[in-house]
Image: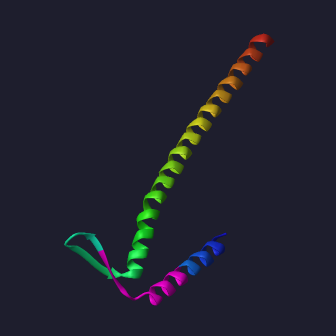
Amino acid sequence: MNALKTVYWIAVATLLLAFIYGNPDPVAVHIWPGLIWETKSWALVVGSLLIGFVPTSLMLRATRWRLTRRIATLEATLAAQAHALTHAAEQASRASDT
């Protein structure tokens, strides 16, 4: 699986480098009247992708972390209940034996 991830990221990096090499033209971005930001077209596209990707990725990681903690808590509660039931059954068995 790690080899497949490595191949994927190499392909993404290769495509990104090809895109950067193929788009060296500067573009002017008119932010508001009187303010013009001049940048390379590839920087604008890559920056836009990162602006969309990073917050989404952070939200996904936070949700996964929260759900992992919740599952661990529920599993611990279930194990404690199972242990309590086993202990109660052993005590009831001992009480009926005497």
- Give me the residue at 57% from left, 41% from top: 72
Q: Position of residue 76 (x, y in %)?
A: 59, 36
Quadrant into which the N terminus falls: bottom right
Give the colour scheme shown. rainbow
Q: Is residue 35 left or right of residue 95?
A: left
Q: Is residue 86 above or below residue 22?
A: above
Instruction: Give whichever of 98, 49 is nearer the camera.
Output: 49
Q: Position of residue 39 (x, y in %)?
A: 32, 81
Kindly identify the residue that appears in the image at 65 percent across and 73 percent down: 4
Left or right: residue 60 versus residue 41 is: right
In which quadrant is the C terminus drawn? top right
Magenta span contains residue 18: yes
Q: Position of residue 82 (x, y in %)?
A: 68, 29
Q: Residue furthest right?
A: 97
Q: For the magenta stretch, what is the residue range?
A: 13-29
Q: Quadrant of residue 37?
A: bottom left
59 w.r.t. 17: above or below? above
| 2 left or right of 26 in image | right
**Residue 96 placement: quadrant:** top right
Q: Nearer the viewer, residue 7 or 96?
A: 7
